[in-house]
Amino acid sequence: MSGTTEALFYHLEHQPLEAVLPQLLEKTLERGWRAVVQAGTVERLEVLDQHLWTWREDSFLPHGRRQDGHPERQPVYLTTTDENPNGATVRFLVDGAEPPDPTGYTRLVVMFDGTDESAVAAARGNWKVFKEKGCAVTYWQQGESGGWVKKA
């Protein structure tokens, strides 16, 4: 995976983050990639940590945080900082997480609540920053059925 970092912006309108994030993480792991999920607050990170273990009755997403030990072994690493101890090439930014330097990532996935004006404004700011840093930016809007439509 080389070349320009992709910055994908997911505008959540019809499903909450808890419904969408696990699906995208599963697809990331199916491709053999590692991921970091960076949340804006410790409280949100704790909620996501619990949710990823139980999000489906027949499945869980293997993941961990620093306090779980062996962060370098985690296929999905959860954090509130810009650390990347598992060597992830995909980084998910949720709930207002501060974007890291895009260098070294194949994909940066910014997920934001389309009903929250401050989240939309922050996403617009991140779009501009990633574009200025040379990322290939795309905007995905959620349809009523939950599918994604590329809008820009």
Image (spheres, rainbow, N blue to C red):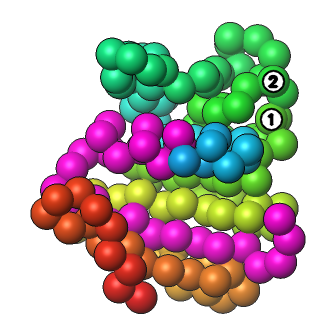
Q: CA distance from mark 1 to mark 2?
A: 6 Å
- Where disc 1 sits, the SS reads loop
- List x then y, in percent, for residue 147: 28, 62
- Residue identified by numbered label 2: 73
Residue at position x 83%, y 65% in the image: 1
Q: Which residue is mark 1?
A: 86
Residue 122 in view in this figure: no
Instruction: Indicate the quadrant where residue 119 lies.
Output: bottom left
Q: How many marks?
A: 2
Q: Which residues are magenta?
A: 1-26
| SS for callout 2 | helix
Three-letter amino acid code at disc 2?
A: Arg
In the rendered view, does 141 fall on the left or right side of 111?
left
Say above or below: 145 vs 29.
Answer: below
Q: Which mark is residue 22?
A: none
User: In the rendered image, is residue 60 in sight?
Assistant: yes
Q: Which residue occupies the foreground of this view, 65 or 74?
A: 74
Residue occupying the point 81% across, 16% down: 70
